[in-house]
Image: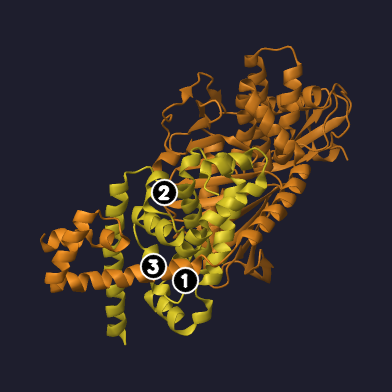
Chain colours: A yellow, B orange
């Protein structure tokens, strides 16, 4: 189970489509969290995550660097999310997030949806690491290997991402208070 | 350890990444510093939220759904591939042969003319309204013909530049500069590039096509066209508008709320095309529409001249079609859509002939070039094709006749490709 992305991609391209399963298992959580933050609900996120992975499967032969599968996948997910947003004319506003987290609890990905929304707004390099660490449950060593960066950079980026998330969540809460 | 140093290490402290000595230093500082205590409380809180959410989300399992979707999609694609067998064949042939790449490009260029200048003279409702819509970029998919499983052209229009790719030949990219009348063709399998001159007909026609598209959209917004009710396309409710004029019919299906066009169907003369997946003002990387040869591409000398196509060129197209593609017999149809379908056969036949690459390329170019004239007839006159099954060389049987706007007589082309001027009353039935 601890084979690299590259290994599974090559297996798929060599005619073992079922091995795509492993990649789905590895990244579905990450994609769900990322997409939920962008799209505002669990159902939309699930739909988009499925679409993303199906698209990835059928375009795997176009992936030039199998080592950067995750970045590529995130790129597809962002594209799918954009398409969906356009399609549904979702304007992801704070009000919307709040009404989701207050009224439609059952449709949320998690109890704490504001967090995913804040993650979705992080710059890509920070978002990637937060997603992999907590939603993909990867160790920092694995992340370092996967993103091809020194371990120190991963932990520093993680620290900075924490600070950004905290600020963004605080800002959001303050605004809510103000609006109430 | 001071506060700044401590704060920098807090996340690593929470995550347990720190070595013994650092850990201890942080602990000691925390014991004596309220500010940092507050800080770590916040961060621990955030950490717990992240871990909780992460656990929560990872309980969702999409694996089976996704694998099912893939199997289903694969079946759909296999069926479509069966249907579009020739398209796939085309792709593999083009990938293999360097010569045919250029020949194929030449033929595909005629697709550039979809929407060639019919608009100026006849669609007055479009003329009177100045385009208010000034989207800097327009992205759309264009299908020639009414067969939606047929090849799609993906178009990225940025000001005067268009980047165009064909779904059945993904290795070829055309970038058109409508200002200079130049086209850059990139073939990304062998990383070759070449320029083509598209001044004249193609340049004009394409320019009008972009302008026209804008006017059409404007008209939907303003409601200057007839409303034809609602239907559902791909699960989305759309409202239809239709605009008619002697030579064109335009049907636009748009989102009833935002007026965003979902699908545009164009009938121009005897040509039908569909535009869909329209996007406006999407951020486009300028490199995508650059006229510079990208790094790593080798510029080829074969430059393509597509200017000033005339009747003679069209006759050459007919000759190639009958003599080479049809083994001496004229085809069922002569139009743009069928030209695209015939490319694989032409390429196959050329390979079987004992000719040089240059000669083969030239034949490919000629085949496409004549169709530029055909498009002109289609938009600025009337035409009729009656050559199905006629033998090449049959001097008594008319196969194609046309009348340009303002001309009193018809030009009639016979099976041996000689041409006569004929008055309307003497026209073949």
In the image, is B20 to the left or to the right of B424?
A: left
The kind of secondary structure element at disc 2 is helix
**Placement of A80 over or under B241, stated as above or below:** above
Q: Which residue is the site of mark 1?
A: A40
**Quadrant (top left, top right, bottom left, bottom right) of the C terminus of chain B:** top right
User: Do residues under tags 1 and 3 come within 8 Å of each other at their CB atoms?
Assistant: no
Q: CA distance from mark 2 to mark 1?
A: 29 Å
Residue B255 placement: quadrant: bottom right
Residue B243, position in %: x, y? 63, 61
Whether labels 1 and 3 share one chain: no
**Placement of B201 over or under A163, stated as above or below:** above
Which mark is first along the chain, 1 or 2? 1
Q: Which residue is the site of mark 2?
A: A142
- Name the residue rendered at 43%, 73% in the picture: A113
Residue B380 placement: quadrant: top right
Which of the numbered marks, if any, corresponds to residue A105?
none
């Amino acid at each position: 189970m601890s084979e690299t992305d590259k290994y599974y991609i090559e297996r798929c391209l060599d005619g073992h489509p079922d091995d795509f399963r492993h990649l789905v298992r590895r990244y579905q959580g990450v994609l769900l969290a990322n997409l939920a933050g962008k799209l505002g609900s669990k159902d939309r996120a699930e739909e988009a995550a499925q679409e993303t992975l199906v698209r990835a499967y059928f375009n795997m032969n176009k992936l030039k660097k199998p080592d950067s599968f995750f970045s590529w996948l995130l790129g597809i997910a962002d594209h799918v999310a954009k398409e969906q947003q356009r399609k549904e004319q979702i304007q992801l506003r704070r009000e919307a997030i709040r009404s989701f987290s207050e009224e439609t609890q059952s449709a949320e990905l998690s109890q704490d949806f504001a967090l995913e929304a804040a993650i979705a707004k992080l710059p890509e390099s920070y978002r990637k690491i937060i997603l992999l660490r907590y939603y993909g449950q990867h160790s920092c060593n694995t992340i370092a290997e996967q993103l091809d960066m020194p371990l120190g950079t991963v932990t520093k980026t993680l620290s900075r991402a924490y600070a950004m998330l905290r600020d963004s969540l605080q800002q959001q809460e303050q605004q809510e208070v103000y609006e109430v | 350890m001071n506060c700044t140093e401590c704060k920098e290490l807090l996340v690593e402290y929470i995550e347990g990444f720190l070595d013994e000595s650092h850990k201890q230093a942080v602990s000691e500082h925390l014991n004596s510093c309220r500010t940092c205590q507050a800080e770590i409380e916040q961060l621990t809180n955030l950490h717990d939220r992240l871990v909780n959410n992460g656990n929560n989300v990872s309980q969702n399992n999409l694996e089976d759904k996704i694998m099912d979707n893939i199997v289903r999609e694969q079946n759909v694609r296999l069926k479509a591939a069966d249907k579009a067998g020739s398209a796939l064949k085309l792709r593999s042939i083009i990938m293999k042969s360097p010569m045919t790449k250029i020949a194929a490009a030449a033929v595909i260029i005629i697709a550039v003319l979809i929407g060639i200048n019919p608009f100026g003279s006849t669609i007055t409702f479009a003329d009177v309204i100045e385009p208010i819509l000034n989207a800097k970029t327009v992205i759309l998919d264009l299908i020639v013909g009414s067969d939606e499983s047929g090849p799609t052209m993906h178009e990225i229009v940025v000001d005067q530049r268009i980047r165009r790719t064909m779904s059945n030949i993904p290795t070829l990219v055309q970038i058109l500069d409508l200002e200079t009348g130049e086209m850059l063709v990139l073939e990304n399998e062998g990383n070759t590039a070449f320029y083509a001159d598209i001044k004249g007909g193609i340049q004009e026609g394409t320019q009008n096509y972009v302008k026209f598209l804008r006017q059409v959209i404007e008209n939907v917004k303003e409601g200057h066209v007839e409303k034809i009710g609602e239907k559902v396309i791909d699960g989305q409710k759309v409202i239809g508008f239709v605009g008619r004029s002697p030579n064109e019919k335009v049907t636009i299906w748009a989102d009833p709320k935002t007026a965003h066009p979902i699908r545009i169907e164009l009938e121009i003369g005897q040509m039908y095309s569909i535009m869909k997946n329209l996007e406006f003002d999407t951020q486009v990387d300028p490199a995508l529409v650059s006229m510079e040869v990208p790094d790593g591409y080798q510029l080829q000398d074969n430059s393509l001249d597509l200017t000033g196509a005339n009747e003679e060129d069209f006759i050459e197209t007919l000759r190639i079609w009958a003599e080479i593609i049809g083994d001496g017999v004229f085809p069922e149809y002569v139009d743009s859509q069928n030209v695209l379908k015939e490319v694989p056969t032409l390429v196959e036949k050329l390979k079987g002939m004992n000719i040089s690459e240059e000669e083969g390329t030239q034949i490919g170019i000629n085949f496409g070039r004549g169709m530029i004239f055909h498009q002109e007839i289609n938009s600025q006159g009337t035409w009729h094709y009656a050559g199905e099954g006629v033998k090449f060389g049959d001097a008594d049987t008319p196969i194609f006749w046309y009348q340009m706007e303002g001309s009193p007589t018809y030009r009639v082309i016979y099976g041996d490709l000689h041409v006569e001027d004929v008055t309307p009353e003497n026209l073949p039935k």
